[in-house]
Amino acid sequence: MKYSDKGLVSRIKVNDQRAFKELVNKYQSKIFMIAYGVLKNEDDAYDAVQEVFLKVYKYIQNFQENSTLYTWIYRITYNVSIDLYRKKKGEYSVEFGDSSKIDPNSDSLSRRVITPSEKAEQKELSEQLEFAISQLSEEHRTILVLREFEGLSYDEIAEITSTPKGTVMSRLYHARLNLKKFLEEFV
């Protein structure tokens, strides 16, 4: 049975293991993307996801529902990821994925094979983007990832990062500006 977030919290608070499993299934990929965006390392992102769910399980009784469950979990994810990043700072290398994969769900008209030269250009662009993002400050990189890769609203980012909305908007603006500078000669 599928529960709303509020229903999941209620069920988990009375030790319903199926509800917790449903929560994990609902949020694990989103949590992974946030962690990966901050940590830039797949193995560390998986470690962060595991730690996030341990913390959610341990502290769900303290969840007051002043914010949404989604925001609360993302806040935990952000904190865990930043802590892990600080512990392992300088050890990361990120790959944004193989852009030559064809989406099997797309219609056949939009599918096409990517030539080796296009693949090489995409790889070079991906590497340049990776480098540019790694050059951003921790605050700028985090807000950029939350907004551009996760699609969170300014309000959600402000709540997750405990930063005023205006500061979030300013940091995002400067992150984009700096990213543009790093990519200017390439694009």
Image (cartoon, helix red, strand yellow):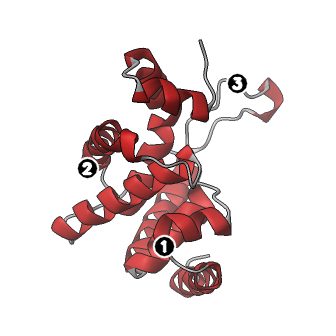
Dot 2: element: helix
Of mark 3 and mark 1, the one earlier in the sequence is 3
Which amino acid type is marked by label 2? Asp
**Nearer-the-camera pick, 131 or 151:** 151
Rendered position, 55 above or below 110: below
Q: Which residue sits at x=38%, y=77%?
A: 138
Q: Can residue 95 be seen in this view?
A: no
For badge 1, the amino acid type reads Ser
In the rendered view of the protein, which quadrant contains the N terminus?
top right
* Image location (x, y in percent) of residue 172: 60, 79
* Residue 26 rendering spot, x and y as whole percentages: 53, 30
Q: How far apart are marks 2 and 1 (CA)?
A: 23 Å
Q: Assess disc 1: are there few (<14), some (14-19) or many (≥20) residues with their C-alpha within 10 Å of its C-alpha.
A: few
Observer-nearest residue: 168 or 44?
Answer: 168
Disc number for residue 44: 2
The amino acid sitting under disc 3 is Asn
Q: Where is residue 12 in the image (x, y as percent from the top left)?
A: 43, 27
Q: Which of 165 and 149 lies nearest the eye of the viewer?
A: 165
Residue 24: assigned label: none
Q: Name the residue under label 3.
A: 105
Q: Is mark 1 on a helix, strand or loop?
A: loop
Mark 2–mark 1 CB contact (< 8 Å):
no
